[in-house]
């Protein structure tokens, strides 16, 4: 019987070591949405269905943080190409985005309001 308890303890130790190896790098990198701007952008953009279905990945995004009525607020702005358009296929190939939201916890944030403004090429 002692051998069986030793195996169980060994398996628990291995499982714990694997868990720590997987989760620790996320914490070690500083992926705290309250403080890490890059982590915040990469959290909210893929989580919003319209970004993934309508827009290609945005090349340049700007993040501004500001507290609103006791909430940790943020605003993301940038220009993002419309998904599925071939080059020269449209006079209006991208959207100017503005997304306002709040960071609720170090691991969760929510977009509360989003505006997409069609961005057209000037006539030549």
Image (cartoon, rainbow, N blue to C red):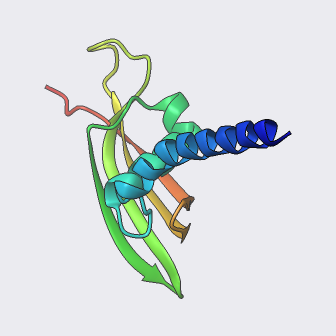
Residue 58 locus on image (x, y percent): 33, 37
Quick one: 43 or 9, which is closer to the camera? 9
Task: Name the outermost residue toward the front.
Answer: 2
Quick one: 95 or 101, which is closer to the camera? 101
Is 39 placed above or below 92 here? below
Q: Is residue 124 visible?
A: yes
Number of marks in picture: 0
For the point 33% across and 14% down, the residue is: 89
Is 120 placed above or below 19 here? above
Taking the image as shown, residue 62 lies to the left or right of residue 101, namely: left
Quick one: 39 or 25, which is closer to the camera? 25
Q: Is residue 48 visible?
A: no
Quadrant position of the N terminus in the picture: top right
Taking the image as shown, residue 12 lies to the left or right of residue 94, namely: right
For the point 60% across and 47% down, the residue is: 16
Quick one: 99 or 93, which is closer to the camera? 99
Quadrant position of the C terminus in the picture: top left
Task: Name the outermost residue toward the right.
Answer: 1
Residue 42 locus on image (x, y percent): 41, 46
For the point 52% across and 48% down, the residue is: 20
Residue 10 locus on image (x, y percent): 65, 40
What is the quadrant of residue 84 in the picture?
top left
Residue 40 locus on image (x, y percent): 42, 56
What is the quadrant of residue 87 in the picture?
top left
Task: Name the outermost residue toward the bottom.
Answer: 69
For the point 26% across and 37% down, the residue is: 59
Task: Name the outermost residue toward the left.
Answer: 124
């Amino acid at each position: 019987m002692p051998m069986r308890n030793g195996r169980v303890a060994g398996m628990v130790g291995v499982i714990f070591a694997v868990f720590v190896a997987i989760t620790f790098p996320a914490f070690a990198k500083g992926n705290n949405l309250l403080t890490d701007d890059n982590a915040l952008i990469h959290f909210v953009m893929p989580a919003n269905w319209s970004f993934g279905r309508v827009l290609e990945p945005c090349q340049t995004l700007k993040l501004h943080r500001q507290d609103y009525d006791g909430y940790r607020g943020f605003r993301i702005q940038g220009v993002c190409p419309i998904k599925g358009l071939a080059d020269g296929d449209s006079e209006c190939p991208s959207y100017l985005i503005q997304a306002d939201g709040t960071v609720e916890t170090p691991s969760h944030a929510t977009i509360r309001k989003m505006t997409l403004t069609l961005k057209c090429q000037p006539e030549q």
